[in-house]
Image (cartoon, rainbow, N blue to C red):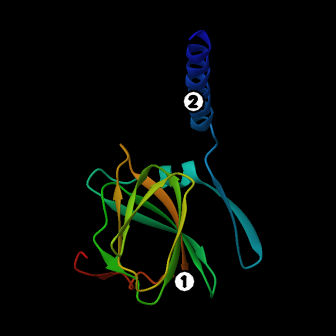
Amino acid sequence: MASKSKRVWIEGHLVFLFLALLSCAPAPRFYLQYGNRLSERDLDSLLAANALAAAENFKVVTLGQTREVSHHVVQIRDREAPHIHKDHDVTVVILRGQGYLMWEKKRVDLVAGDVLFIPRASVHYFINTHSGPTVALAIYSPPFDGKDTIPVEQP
């Protein structure tokens, strides 16, 4: 019995240590080059400069684009409405928070660090389950024009 309680004590402390280290991780930095200049953008600074207002549910900040792809930081407080992107594929990287994506008729649980590819014309929407806004990097191909979010009925 003593060895089982010792193992549980060690496992509990390892989980605590892991969570403590995770909370101390530095904010992601984005190294992006559009044209000839490489720039570094820090997530904390970007979010501070583009804070989600109390009445806002969703905010998109465009980092930049080339002829083939665009990069955006997305903040979501609650949820998206079901929609498709008829002309765009999107890759999503969860940077902070958690929630789940309804994709066609499947639920995909997502936490910080997860990466998801959503092909064009796929019905999807995100629901935040975190206490604060969830933050993601969205990479669109071709570059997102802001016009290709087409509402659909819930599947």
Looking at the figure, which quarter contains the N terminus?
A: top right
Tell me the quarter of the picture where residue 4 sits: top right
Front residue of this view, candidates 114 and 54: 114
User: What residue lies at 33% left-to-right and 72% top-to-bottom?
Assistant: 105
Res. 120 visible in picture: yes
Say which element carries label 1: loop
Looking at the figure, which quarter contains the C terminus?
A: bottom left
Q: Position of residue 19 (x, y in %)?
A: 56, 33
> Disc number at residue 143?
1
Amino acid type, residue under disc 2 in the picture: Val
Tell me the quarter of the picture where residue 106 sits: bottom left
User: What residue lies at 46% left-to-right and 56% top-to-bottom?
Assistant: 110
Please, is residue 33 above or below residue 12 in the view? below
Q: Position of residue 153 (x, y in %)?
A: 22, 79
In primary-sequence order, the first of circles 1 and 2 is: 2
Amino acid type, residue under disc 1 in the picture: Pro
User: What residue lies at 41% left-to-right and 83% top-to-bottom?
Assistant: 85
Please, is residue 48 above or below residue 10 in the view? below
Classify mark 1: residues with Cα within 10 Å, few (<14), some (14-19) or many (20+): some
Please, is residue 78 above or below residue 148 in the view? above
State the residue lying farthest toward the front: 1
Q: Position of residue 119 (x, y in %)?
A: 49, 81
* Mark nearer the viewer, 1 or 2: 2
Q: Position of residue 48 (x, y in %)?
A: 49, 49
Circles 1, 2 touching at the beta carbon (< 8 Å): no
List the residue tagged with mark 2: 15
Classify mark 2: residues with Cα within 10 Å, few (<14), some (14-19) or many (20+): few
